[in-house]
Amino acid sequence: DLPSAAYSPVQSVNPPDAPWEQSLGASIFGTPQYMLPVDDLGGAVPPSWQHRNQPAPAGLRLAMSWLELLPSADNPQTSITIHGVPYTATLGPSGRENDIYLFQQ
């Protein structure tokens, strides 16, 4: 027995008289102010971090991978910010994910 054409699953999920209002920024993961900021990766570098041109530390590479910000053969340079300082991340000579260099802009 199939539902009638007038039935819509959305009607049962989001009735018009729902006591709450869903905003564009809300999601099952919480409101945006509690989400991880993607614009600055300062939390992924060690406390002893010093701004300069250098290889990317393992924790930063992991965060960049998780956020899909690692350079690749198709996209050899990416831009990131660490503690408010802009960097360009590039593949090293090996072209591997664990060979990423950072250049302060």
Image: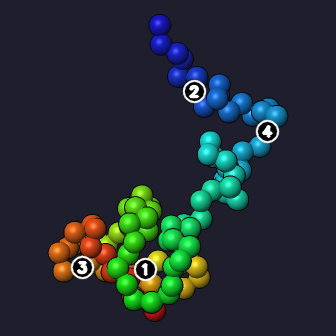
> Mark 3 against mark 4, which lies toward the viewer?
3
Task: Indicate which disc, 3 or 1, sits on the residue closer to the N terminus.
Answer: 1
Task: Indicate which disc, 3 or 4, sits on the residue closer to the N terminus.
Answer: 4
* Alpha-carbon span between mark 2 and mark 4: 18 Å
Q: Between residues 3 and 88, which one lies in front from this camera angle?
A: 88
Q: Which residue is mark 1?
A: 79
Q: Which residue is mark 3?
A: 92
Residue type (three-letter) at the residue carrying disc 4: Trp
Residue type (three-letter) at the residue carrying disc 2: Pro
Vertical comparison of 5 with 1: above or below: below
> Mark 2 against mark 4, which lies toward the viewer?
4
* Alpha-carbon span between mark 2 and mark 3: 51 Å
Q: Which residue is mark 2?
A: 9
Task: Indicate which disc, 2 or 4, sits on the residue closer to the N terminus.
Answer: 2
Q: Between residues 3 and 97, which one lies in front from this camera angle?
A: 97
* Alpha-carbon span between mark 1 and mark 4: 39 Å
Give the farthest residue toward the front: 48
> Mark 3 against mark 1, which lies toward the viewer?
3
- Answer left or right for 64 relative to 85: left
Numbered tag placed on residue 20 in the rendering: 4
Disc 2, SS:
helix
- The structure residue drawn at horizontal position 78% and vertical position 33%, both measured from the top left corner, is 18
- The structure residue drawn at horizontal position 47% and vertical position 13%, both measured from the top left corner, is 2
Task: Indicate which disc, 1 or 4, sits on the residue closer to the N terminus.
Answer: 4
The percent coordinates of residue 50 (x first, y second) are: 51, 85
